[in-house]
Image (cartoon, rainbow, N blue to C red):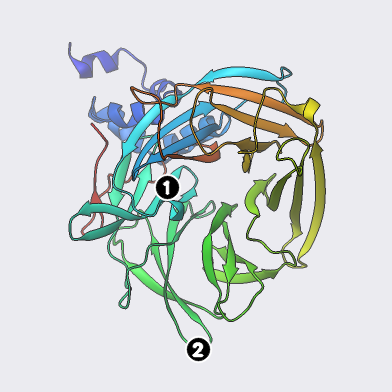
């Protein structure tokens, strides 16, 4: 069959609409079908159309890590108007990723994941950007660190300039931190040096919300922790002072605002459990609102134990709770604070040929939107493409 002739049977103005309804991984593969389709898929207006469609149906991205190997799946998120207390959904497999050393330092933003410690060769570790939805990945150039190997970093997305940036710590002087920053998708992918006026480093808890990277910051010379705020577009730092110890708090995107949330079980390790959340209402004034919710035993849709933790929140404000293992049956829970309801979602298909056994951990990325904005296959002299998996 002649591919060009076959594509001509479809009106050109309908092709973008048809393609935008397909999964991101299929779209990447369809670029090879014809020059016409490739030109359509690479156009900025098509990328925005696909992103708009994908944003209307966000998914739960699930990464299962075992022995340095990641397997990525995604499943539908229940709509906020769904009335049933339980449902069953099927997960889609996306890709497998091997040889990641320090998995808890990975950073997620707008559909991409940054790994600072991916083992490519026997000589050392590389920084890698991965798009789980398309199966693409690329090695970033070495950062400018001279004194030690950096195994951390933050990935942020600027929704105005539509740019991804990676921020890593380099060195500390007497009264400032030196960071290196890399803008992805540019013609010359290279690191630049920027200065943080205070000596607050970042820990592993972080999140990007509306172009601002929030992270738990700490100073080795001080006891109190702070919230670091990095404007991805302006490349400026700001720090928020909060009173409680943040070590047990999860950073979440709560309806477009930064939320700090902590989960406490009853003394016997079961229900009731308490969710204590603080929401940042005004960054400049540093005004917070505190909410406390109690989940009683009757809230349970299915039997759960004390391995639950908060993994994020949906755009509608439902707080997502899950376990850190993938043993069957595999449940994720959605708590609606306004209705005081807890829904259970059994996710089927989060597995390999056999069940998950032994030491493994599950990572969750709520409201995952498939993204075509940054094409990691665009290689330059400084960034090397790993290509899609077989």
Whole-percent x, y for residue 198 in the image: 57, 80
Give the image quarter of residue 273. top right
Q: Is residue 312 left or right of residue 191?
A: right
Q: Is residue 11 left or right of residue 89?
A: left
Q: Residue reaching furthest bottom?
A: 174
SS for tag 1? strand
Q: Is residue 65 left or right of residue 379?
A: right
Residue 382 visible in the shown view:
no
Question: Which residue occupies the foreground of this view, 48 or 178?
Answer: 178
Give the image quarter of residue 372. top left
SS for tag 2? loop
Question: Which residue occupies the foreground of this view, 339 or 17?
Answer: 339
Q: Count all numbered tags in the image, as a single digit.
A: 2
Quadrant location, the C terminus = top left
Res 113 label: 1
* Sooner in the amino-acid sequence: mark 2 or mark 1: 1
Q: Which residue is mark 2?
A: 174
Q: Is residue 279 above or below residue 305?
A: below
Mark 1 surroundings within 10 Å by alpha-carbon count, few (fewer than 14), some (14 through 19), many (20 or more): some
Whole-percent x, y for residue 368 in the image: 52, 37
Mark 2 surroundings within 10 Å by alpha-carbon count, few (fewer than 14), some (14 through 19), many (20 or more): few
Residue ID at (62%, 42%): 309
């Amino acid at each position: 069959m002649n591919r060009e002739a076959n594509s001509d049977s479809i009106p050109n103005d309908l092709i973008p609409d048809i393609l935008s309804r397909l999964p991101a991984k299929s779209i990447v593969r369809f670029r090879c079908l014809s020059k016409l389709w490739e030109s359509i898929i690479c156009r900025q207006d098509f990328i925005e159309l696909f992103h708009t469609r994908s944003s209307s149906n966000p998914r739960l991205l699930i990464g299962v890590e075992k022995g340095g190997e990641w397997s990525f799946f995604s499943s539908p998120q229940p709509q906020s108007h769904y009335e049933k207390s339980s449902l069953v959904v099927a997960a889609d497999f996306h890709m497998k990723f091997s040889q990641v050393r320090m998995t808890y330092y990975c950073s997620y933003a707008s559909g991409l994941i940054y790994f600072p410690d991916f083992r490519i060769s026997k000589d050392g570790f590389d920084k890698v950007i991965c798009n789980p939805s398309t199966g693409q990945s690329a090695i970033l150039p070495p950062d400018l660190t001279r004194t030690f190997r950096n195994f951390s970093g933050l990935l942020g997305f600027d929704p105005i300039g539509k740019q991804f940036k990676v921020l890593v710590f380099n060195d500390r002087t007497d009264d400032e931190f030196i960071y290196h920053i890399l803008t992805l998708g540019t013609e010359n992918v290279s690191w630049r040096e920027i200065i943080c006026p205070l000596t607050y480093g970042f820990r592993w808890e972080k999140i990007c919300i509306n172009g601002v990277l929030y992270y738990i910051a700490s100073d080795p010379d001080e006891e109190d922790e702070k919230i670091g705020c990095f404007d991805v577009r302006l490349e400026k730092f700001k720090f928020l002072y909060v009173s409680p110890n943040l070590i047990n708090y999860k950073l979440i995107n709560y309806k477009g605002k930064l939320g700090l949330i902590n989960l406490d079980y009853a003394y016997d390790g079961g229900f009731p459990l308490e969710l204590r959340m603080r929401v940042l209402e005004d960054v400049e004034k540093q005004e917070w609102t505190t909410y406390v919710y109690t989940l009683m035993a009757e809230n349970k849709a299915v039997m759960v134990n004390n391995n639950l933790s908060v993994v994020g929140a949906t755009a509608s404000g439902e707080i997502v709770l899950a376990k850190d293992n993938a043993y069957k049956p595999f449940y994720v829970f959605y708590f609606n604070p306004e209705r005081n309801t807890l829904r259970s979602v059994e996710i089927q298909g989060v597995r390999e040929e056999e069940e998950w056994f032994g030491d493994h951990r599950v990572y969750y990325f709520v409201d995952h939107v498939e993204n075509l904005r940054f094409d990691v296959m665009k290689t330059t002299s400084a960034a090397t493409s790993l290509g899609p998996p077989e």
